Amino acid sequence: RASSSAHVDPSGKHNQGAYFNISQGTTQSVAATLKFTYSAGMSSSVASSLRFAYWDSGTSAWVFPSTGGSVDTSTRVVSQTTTHFSEWAVFGDGDDGMQESNVALNPASPSKCYAVDYDHTVGVMNCELTKVDGGANLRMYLLKGTSCPDANNFQMKTDLVTDNGQSRTICVTGDTTPEVGDGRYMIAVFAEGLSGAGSQTRFSLEVSNDFVCNASPARVAWSAAVAVVVLAASYIMA
């Protein structure tokens, strides 16, 4: 299992950081069932939209099988039966953003990495990290490209998030490095100071396309906002 892929997300879908390269060890036809357990903090609307898709190298596109897929919301398991073996991934509804809630980091898994495929229109990209609870401190790193960032390889980072309920934001604009624009942004959250076996620290992460940095973002239809500006400019010129 990998947390990222070189292939961009399908239009209108967002990856769940779960990619699987599945190979067949026999020439005989074999049926398999793929399963993925999603986070308990995921919204019900996104959870119900989760589906497996495979990468078709012939068409250079993700393909969602028309049959064999299901979501069990009681056990939080996405399933897919298949006889096709290649690269698979889990996608849900959403575009130009993501939201993860109550994600746990522990000594065995002290970091999480996410890929956000971004189709820029106007405004900025806000990446807000919030510490839910736990004894460790948190830090977020961002890097444009296909590699997961860390303390030695990043373009932007937050200060430490130390207190429960505290938030830190990375705001990507036209004046930052990287600049806001089309492409893939990799975001990683690290826990620093986990105290030992059994300890955990939880966080929430939200990535959104907004007008301004780190305020109460005004999430409106971008096309409508642009239309208002154009109309106003035309009226003044007249």
Image (cartoon, rainbow, N blue to C red):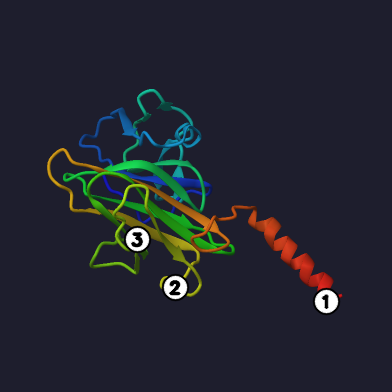
Which residue is rendered at x = 18% and y = 49% of the image?
A: 194
Task: In the rendered structure, find residue 146 and report the number of the disc placed on it.
Answer: 3
Left or right position of 221 against 170: right
Q: Residues within 10 Å of mark 2 (few under 14, many from 20)?
A: few
Q: Residues within 10 Å of mark 1 (few under 14, many from 20)?
A: few
Q: Is residue 77 above or below residue 160?
A: above
Task: In the rendered structure, find residue 237 and report the number of the disc placed on it.
Answer: 1
Q: Amino acid at mark 2?
A: Thr
Q: Which badge, 2 or 1, is on the more N-terminal residue? A: 2
Tag 3, which secondary structure?
A: loop
Residue under pointer 2: 176
Q: CA distance from mark 2 to mark 1?
A: 33 Å
Q: Which quadrant is home to the C terminus? A: bottom right
Q: Residues within 10 Å of mark 3 (few under 14, many from 20)?
A: some
The picture places residue 52, in percent across and down from the top left corner, at 40, 37
The picture places residue 8, in percent across and down from the top left corner, at 43, 54
Q: Nearer the viewer, residue 67 or 196?
A: 196
Q: CA distance from mark 2 to mark 3?
A: 19 Å
Q: Amino acid at mark 1?
A: Met
Q: CA distance from mark 3 to mark 1?
A: 45 Å
Q: Amino acid at mark 3?
A: Thr
User: Which of labels 3 and 1 is toward the front?
Assistant: 1
Task: In the rendered structure, find residue 19 and report the number of the disc placed on it.
Answer: none
Q: Which badge, 3 or 1, is on the more N-terminal residue? A: 3
Tag 2, which secondary structure?
A: loop
Q: Nearer the viewer, residue 25 or 46?
A: 46
The picture places residue 13, in percent across and down from the top left corner, at 49, 45
User: Which of labels 2 and 3 is toward the front?
Assistant: 2
Q: Is residue 74 above or below residue 1?
A: above
